[in-house]
Each structure stands twice: as structure tokens, then as C-alpha cells.
Amino acid sequence: MYSERRRDTMQRIEVIDSHTGGEPTRVVIGGGPDLGVGPMDKRRTLFRQHYDAVRSAVVCEPRGSDVMVGALLVPPVDKKSATGVIFFNNVDYLGMCVHGTIGVVATLAYMR
């Protein structure tokens, strides 16, 4: 887990950037923390409490900006779903993001 690694150790995080009407979404497709399974609100809380540095690295400057939304792909709650998603920005975690959802869907279609 990230907390077991030294702070100065670099971690590779794979992302795909999308834009929905000019609104950027950075989709984490690999290298994110393993949040296990279970309800999405519990996984979002785990992400917030233990892996906030990942959120910051993905969407904050110098690689991100204050308008960027991040989307961490996680295993879905419902096995019929393609993925689960945790949305976040440079300040906090989001319960939902419409342009981010469009960006995630476009990214998944691109990856297909």
C-alpha cells in the first residue's frame, strides 16, 4: 500500500485526459490505490483518509489545475457495470460530476 512506501519513492499513475466542452477530466486507468470492494461511499472514505496524496498528485498543479476533475476507476459494485468511479478535484471528493461522467464514458469507449 502507498502508506507503507517511503514518501520519496515515485509511484507511476496511468491516466487518460478527456475534455467535455472544454472541461477537463483526468481518468486514472492504472496505478491507483487498491480500495477493495464494497459500497462506493466506503471506498471514497478510504481514498480520502489514506490516499489523499494520490488525489493531489493527479489533479493539482503543476500537472493539473483548479478546473480539472479526476476520476479513479475502481471495481464496480454491480458486476453488470463496466466500472465504478470516484470523482475528485483539487479541493475535495465529489459525489457526482456530469462532465466527468461524460469524460469517463468517452475514455472507456476509446480504450475498448
Image (spheres, rainbow, N blue to C red):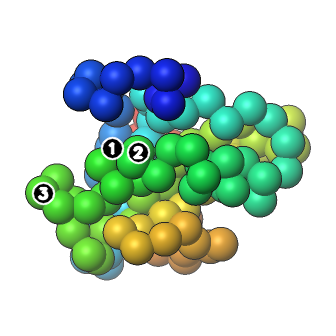
Residue 5, above or below 41: above
Q: Residues within 10 Å of mark 1 (few under 14, many from 20)?
A: some
Residue 70 vs residue 61, the one in the foreground:
61
Residue 80, above or below 61: above
Occupied quadrant, residue 25: bottom left
Q: CA distance from mark 2 to mark 3?
A: 14 Å
* Circle 1: residue type: Ile
Q: Is residue 17 left or right of residue 112?
A: left
Residue 14 vs residue 62, the one in the foreground:
62
Mark 3 / mark 1, whichever is N-terminal: 1
Residue 5 vs residue 67, the one in the foreground:
5
Say what secondary structure mark 1 lies in. Answer: strand
Name the residue: 67% across, 48% down.
Answer: 46
Name the residue: 78% across, 53% down.
Answer: 42
Residue labelled with disc 3: 62
**Which dot, 2 or 1, sits closer to the camera?**
2
* Circle 2: residue type: Val
Occupied quadrant, residue 60: bottom left
Name the residue: 77% across, 59% down.
Answer: 41
The location of residue 71, given as percent across then percent down, is 49, 54
Residue 109, above or below 88: above
Mark 2 / mark 3, whichever is N-terminal: 2
The total number of labels drawn is 3
Q: Residues within 10 Å of mark 2 (few under 14, many from 20)?
A: some
* Circle 3: residue type: Pro
Say what secondary structure mark 2 lies in. Answer: helix
State the mark number for residue 54. Answer: 2
The location of residue 65, given as percent across then percent down, is 21, 68
Q: Is residue 20 visible?
A: no
Residue labelled with disc 1: 16
Mark 2 / mark 1, whichever is N-terminal: 1
Q: CA distance from mark 3 to mark 1?
A: 17 Å
